[in-house]
Amino acid sequence: MARSTSGLSVNSLSAQPVIPLGQTTVLTSDELDRIRKTLLHTDAKTQGQNLQSEDDRLRDKLRDMSRTRMEGWNNTLEARRRQKEAERMAKSEEYEQKRRIQDREEAEFQAAERKKCIQRATALLYENTERVKTFGSKLYLSDVMKERELQIEIKSKIKERKIAEEKLWHERTIEAVKIGDEEEEKKKKEALDRALHAKQVQLDQLEDFRVRYVSQKLEERREGELIKQRVEAHILEEKQKEQERRKLEAERAKKTMLDNQRLREEKKISDQKAQEEEERRIQYFADEKERKTRMREEREAEIMAQKQGIRQRMIDRQVAYLQSLRKNENERIAGQVREAEAKRDAELSAKNEKLRRELEEMRALNTAQLQKKAEQKRLDREQGEIDAKKFEAEYEAGLAADRAAEARRRAKRIELKNYHVKQAKAKTLFLQREKDEELSEQELVKQKLKEEDLLFERYSQALVEQYKAEGKNIKPLLLELAKMKSEGR
């Protein structure tokens, strides 16, 4: 459908001057849209703007939708690279977090160790005093005496336990030997039972095979006797039928002979009557009689000859029929025997043919399986080549991505190295401050040692009370305290 290039309404067109037909151009709607788009794009480019058409906007929208959808895929090379990079960044962040935790735990551990060292140093300084050493030796003497008593008691208990263990071990050894003998006897009995069972199973299998073999032979013999009886019964039935047929044929032949004799007698009587009639007519017609008599005699001779020929042919046919019946009987009996033998051969042939077909089917099935395996192997080899090419392409793409990722990791390592250097410097300053604090703490310890003299009395009294409560010998402790007091220590 065409329209004018002006694009004005009908009223505005009516107000315009009339243009001759030869000076107008008719454009299609598609051409008009294309011209408009071209002009709009030209104006937009002149003004520095980028004007998109509906198709461009639709294309950009579909491309954005496709990219948005593709970002959710996790089986593309880009997605795999992003996943690997995210995993590397997560591992690096996890490593850095663990490193910070380790640094914090290390600082706590060092502080605890430092505190323990201070406490140990305090204890050592306190224990290095003359009074504590002397009093400690007496404590040690008391502990030794108590330990000696405990050792004697423990030694007696160990001796009693050893005697009980030896007795228990002896009883267990006797029990183990008894159990071993019982197990050995049980194993021998089980082996004998298995051998007897295996022997009985073999005997049962042999007996079963013998019974099946004998049953098969008896079945074949019964089948042969049944076939023989059927053949004999069939032959006897055929003989009886043949005898009845022969009897019927003999009666029929006898009846035929009687009928022929009766016909001959009747013919003879009729011939005599005719001859008498002719003789009477001869009296009336002498000449005619002689002529007719000659003609009649010739005719009768011809008829008699025909009758004799027919009769002889009937007799020959009957003799030939009886001979053929006798011959057919012998052939039928032989044919029945041959038929039974052919039936038996056919059954054997059918069994052999069935076995041959089964073997051929097995060979065909085996051949088909081999062909199928060969075809599957070929397909696997082709698929392997395709997968190898695909893997090679993915490997190349992965190498490029790994190179870029390695560059990012290198930058990350440099950043981590700088961070670690900064931490090391801060740790060195922290250790220096701790060392200074430790020196000041040692000064405090020296001051506190002076206060230990005041605490020694309470300390010694507490230990005496403790040893007394534990049942130890406190006499060396009291003597030492009295000596210290007398010496003014």
Image (tube, rainbow, N blue to C red):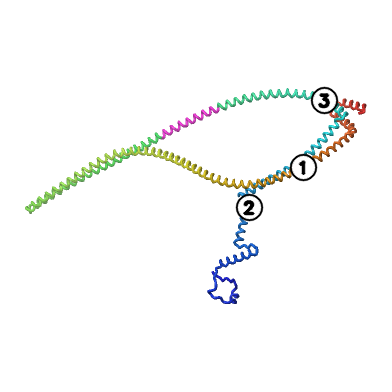
Q: Which residues are magenta?
A: 193-219
Tag 3 and tag 1, C-beta contact below 8 Å: no
Residue at the farthest front position:
46
Residue 250 visible in the current orientation: no
* Circle 2 crowding by C-alpha within 10 Å: few under 14, some 14–19, many from 20: few
The answer to whether residue 229 is left or right of residue 108 is: left
| Disc 2, SS | helix
Residue 144: assigned label: 3
**First-in-chain label (3 vs 1):** 3
Q: Amino acid at mark 1?
A: Lys
**172 or 308, which is in the foreground?**
172
Residue 71: assigned label: 2
Determine which residue is flagged by label 1.
Answer: 425
Question: Measuring 59% from the left and 26% from the top, which residue is drawn there?
Answer: 187
Residue 133: assigned label: none
Question: Measuring 77% from the left and 42% from the top, which residue is drawn there?
Answer: 425
- 213 magenta-colored: yes
Which mark is in front, 3 or 1?
1
Which mark is in front, 2 or 3?
2
**Could you tell me residue 468's position as x and y percent?**
86, 28
Which mark is in front, 2 or 1?
1
| Disc 1, SS | helix
Q: Marks 3 and 1, how far apart in space? A: 53 Å
**Could you tell me residue 380's position as x and y percent?**
52, 44
**Could you tell me residue 50's position as x and y percent?**
64, 62
- 105 magenta-colored: no
For the C terminus, give its image quadrant. top right
Give the image quarter of residue 251.
top left
Q: Marks 2 and 3, how far apart in space? A: 80 Å
**First-in-chain label (2 vs 3):** 2
For the N terminus, give its image quadrant. bottom right
Q: Amino acid at mark 3?
A: Val
